[in-house]
Each structure stands twice: as structure tokens, then as C-alpha cells.
Amino acid sequence: MLSLPTQPPEVYQERRLRLATRVAGATTMIFAGRARPRNYAANTYAYRPDSHFLYLVGCGIQQAVLVGEGDIWELYLPEDPPGAALWHGESPSLEEIAARTGVARVHALRTLSSRLHVGADRIATVPAIDPLTRLSQGALLGRAWALHDDAELGPAPLTGGDAALADALIELRLRHDDAALQHLRAAAEGTYAAHLAGMAATAPGRLEHAVVAAIEAEMLARGMQPAYGSIVSVHGEVLHNEGHGHTMAAGDLLLVDAGAEHAGWASDVTRTWPVSGRYTSTQRDLYQVVLAAQRAAIERVRPGARYRDIHLYAALELTRGLVELGIFRGEPEGLVERGAHALFFPHGLGHLLGLDVHDMEDLGDRAGYAPDRARAQQFGLGYLRLDRDLAPGMLVTIEPGFYQVPAILADRGLCGPFDDSGALDRARLAAFADVRGIRIEDDVLCTEGAPEVLTAAIPKDIEAIERLVGRGVGA
Ligand SMILES: [Mn+2]
């Protein structure tokens, strides 16, 4: 059974019209994708529609293809296999799908090849991120996209009309409309409940799994789902640690990066709290440094601001704090120029957020980087996912962190210049051994005026967090 759109059809008609005016003359095809088999064909991973399709149609219909020519739109839908109603219930009628999506013309998928009369090379498309879909799409349209044999399905290099379509979609999806913001706010509310439940479920002796269960229960109970694999770990220094098997101990910090997805729209929030319910004095000191850097960066989310500059400003604030704590010696500005902060803050300040938690990263850096900009070579800055000038309606994450990553701190190539010049005080750093990883992340909307933090309700002050941790355990 398929879901139907959550917004009135006019919302999607308006988006499609705006797209049509940007790709005038082209015939476009957007593929909805399909569920991937887990261990045998009928047992699949949960279906997640292609985000471009979801944006333009409002719901996922497995294997469907949206075709546009000027502002004439058509949906090509697979026919139900025999017995589908028995196993999956009645599907909505074609009339109902047409009414709810606002796409008046609905056809059988088997007739899609008739649309190729314009010439496959004149059809603009976005390579689906789902490998099975990408294979059949490439075969249909004669595109020779590479499928990587590792787990990472890279973005396909885009040319001609495909590139123009991708750029048009990016232009639309960069700045969220009111319907999108409704869902993004709802996702943020689900994430608020999830993080509070996670804090309440944390106590020494429990498994990280117990916190994951509490967090995701709140999402599921609201009809939402995790927007990405929840990170819930006492080893916060492993940046994308998706294992949850550690037993939490008093003295540990628990890093929780978890966000709900509502009708396909994502939220992405990180908090770091003490398992015992009390930060140690060293944890407190470093937490305040990260929090100050985060707040200073959020304040700079303004129209016209270059995101890379905000990243570097956060790095500077963080470095200032580390100089005050005696971990670094020297002028913060000079240290940041030399990349010292990246020893402890190796990743970028954040990314675009929307239907995808790293929005439109299926298109590589095309969405995150303005056309005349490219990733830097410097360690740390090279991981920055976003380098655009901000505009009202753009939603970004702001997520500085401090980590003691053994592999970085043992790397002579990275640390040598700072060890040798005395800029890094290892003896002082050793006093902070009980901090493996701290990250604080919020979802920040650029507006005409002051930034709006969609996730502001989720506590991040030390006192507020300490009141909440462990409240739901053993009561
Ligand atoms: Mn994030």
C-alpha cells in the first residue's frame, strides 16, 4: 500500500511549475526508486522514496516515474501484481492518486518507453541513488553511469540537460517553502521528545541500546522514523559510530546524534550528556568551550554570510577556549590559520538540511558548494560539506565538536608542527582524558533577520541537562 501526499496538491503543482520554468523546453524524468531486498526478494528494507520525487509528488510510489514536458506532468505507475490486494490491501485508485498529487495524467509504467520518442538523449534526469533503479534508468535512457562496487554509491557525473535539471532542483530545494518548513518543524518537535527520553533513560550500568530504544520509541510513536542511523555512544570520538553495545559507566559522556524524519523531512541534532547526571569539572570546561563556539556560530547564520566563514569563526572561538584552558599556546588567529583546531575539531561545522539529512548530497558537492567554490586541501577544512552564501529559507546545521581521536593525536604529520613549536601542551591535555568526544548540533534556519533555531527547545545548558539525565531510570 502506498502513502498519499500530506499537503494539498497545489503545493506540489507549484513546485513542479517552478521547476518547469527553470528547465524550459526539456523533457524531465524523476524516478521514485524501490525498496531494496534484505536477504530475499520479498523481505526488503523499508522503502524510502527518492527525495527529488518526494519533493515534486509528495509521496513515494515504488518504481513510479514522474515525467515533465513544459508544465505538463505525467506519472507512470507500476500495475499491482496479482494478489497485491490480498497481501498489501487495496491500492488507491489512479483517480485518487491524480487528485492528491495534482498530476492529472497517470499511465501504466509499461508504456513509459513510448515517452522516448523525443530521443533518450533529450531527456533530462537525475541518477537515482538506489542502485537497482539507477541500473534500469541508465539502461532505459542510455546513460553509462558507473555503479561503484563498494558500499558508497557515489554521485554520477552530470552533463548537459541532466546537469541543468540537477541545478534547477538545487535552486528550488536550497530555500524551503512553507510546506517544507511545516514538516521540518514537526521533525524538530519529534527530535525534542526523543532527546528528552534519551536523557531520562541514561544511567550507569545500562547499555547504549537502552537509550537508542527510548529515543526511537518517541519517533515511532509519532509516526516518524530516524532520519539516519542514530549515533548513541560513550565513544563520541568515533565520529559516525553506529554501534550501541557499550555499557555506560559513571564518568562517561554519552554523545547522541539522532533526528526524526517527518513525511520525509529530516531533523539532525546532537547533544552530549554525562552518564552519571553530573559533568566532571574537566568535561564542564570543554563542554562550555564547544557550546560558546556553537552559539557564536549560530548568531552568524544571516543572509549573505558565507558558511565557510562561519565554520572558520567557530574554529576560532573553539581555539580561543582551548588557549584559555591551556591546551593550546599562542595566538588563536594564527593557530586557526595553521589548522591547529582540526586536531580536535576535524570535521566541518555542518551541512544543508531538508529532505535529506545531508541535503542533496546525492548530487555530490553540487548542492553544498557554490559553482565557483571547491573543497579545500587542508586537513579539517577539506571535510566541510557546505560553502555557500546563506539566504533566507536555507536550513543548515551548526555542529562544532571537540574530540580526542587517538589516530589524529598519534599522527606526527598532523601534530608535529604543533608539538615541536610548543603550541600543543600534551601534559595539560592529559588532564582532560575523560573527554573523548563532545558535539553540540542544532538546526538553524536563515531568515531575513535573526536566525531561527528549529531545535532550540532541546536543552543544551549544563544545568538543564543535569536535571534531566537519569530521571526515567529506577523510579
Ligand atoms: Mn549533522
Image (spheres, helix red, strand yellow):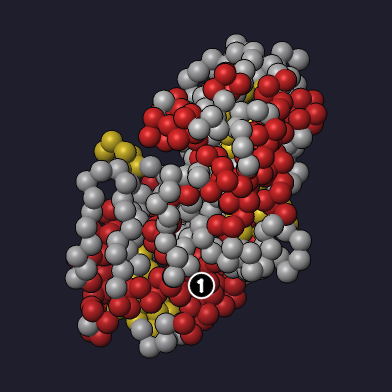
Look at mark 1 in the image and give the residue it sits on. 171
Q: Position of residue 291 (x, y in %)?
A: 70, 39
Label 1 secondary element: helix
Q: Position of residue 144 (x, y in %)?
A: 19, 65
For image coordinates 55% across by 57% down, the residue present is 308
Q: Position of residue 59 (x, y in %)?
A: 49, 61
**142 is higher (above) or lower (below) than 42:** below
Q: Position of residue 299 (x, y in %)?
A: 72, 54
* Towards the viewer: 217 or 353: 353
Q: Is residue 187 left or right of residue 238?
A: right
For the C terminus, the quadrant is top right
Q: Is residue 309 left or right of residue 168?
A: right
For image coordinates 72% across by 41% down, the residue present is 292
Residue type for callout 1: Glu
Q: Is residue 299 visible?
A: yes
For image coordinates 53% across by 80% down, the residue present is 18
